[in-house]
Amino acid sequence: MEVKVINSSRFDLPSYATVGSSGLDLKANIEETLIIGSLERCIVPTGLFLEIPLGYEAQVRPRSGLAFKHGITVLNTPGTIDADYRGEIKVILVNLSNQSFSIEAGERIAQIVFSKIELVSWVDVNAISNTDRGDGGFGHTGR
């Protein structure tokens, strides 16, 4: 799949880190160091503008290292980027740790994954089929 991109940042385009990677790392397109205090959130620009083909979406997801080591995650994970969106890709980060965290220009802050989507057609009915699970949810099967 080809995705048209405008890169208004001074950094290279995202690339796959390994041959088995499904996500591409997004970099912070900022001029100065950004400090995220404990339990604070912020929007970080990437300088990327995409033209995603119809039938696909992009999802912005946390980087596992930032999440585990520093408590930095994507607040609305996964953040969905629709095929008809043409604005700059920005990442909503939140600091869930008890210490401030600094982000430098060009730092890898999140990853983006592209997925094929299926559109649904609703069928309005009066009843749906039963299953063994039924309406059990939110941990109904145990721990």
Image (cartoon, grey):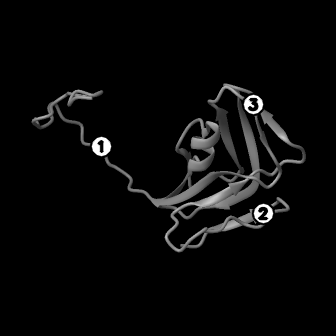
* Foreground label between 2 and 1: 2
As drawn, the label of residue 132 is: none
List the residue tagged with mark 1. 122
Question: Which tag, 3 or 1, sits closer to the chain's start?
Answer: 3
Secondary element at tag 2: strand
List the residue tagged with mark 2. 7
Say which residue appears at 54% left-offset and 58% top-offset. 113
Q: Is residue 37 above or below residue 53?
A: above
Which of 57/11 is in front? 11
Secondary element at tag 3: loop
Give the residue type at disc 1. Trp
Q: Give the side of residue 65 with respect to residue 102, left or right.
A: left
Say which residue appears at 70% left-offset and 26% top-offset. 38
Exactly how many numbered labels are in the figure? Answer: 3
Q: Position of residue 9 (x, y in %)?
A: 82, 59
Q: Position of residue 53 (x, y in %)?
A: 55, 64
Quadrant placement of the C terminus: top left
Q: Is residue 63 visible?
A: no
Q: Give the side of residue 46 with respect to residue 136, left or right.
A: right
List the residue tagged with mark 3. 100
Q: Give the side of residue 34 with respect to residue 39, left or right.
A: right
* Foreground label between 3 and 1: 3
Which of 12/48 is in front? 12
Q: Residues within 10 Å of mark 1 (few under 14, many from 20)?
A: few
Give the residue type at disc 2. Asn
Say which residue appears at 61% left-offset and 68% top-offset. 17
Which of 120/90 is in front? 90
Q: Residues within 10 Å of mark 3 (few under 14, many from 20)?
A: some
Give the residue type at disc 3. Ser
Q: Residues within 10 Å of mark 2 (few under 14, many from 20)?
A: some
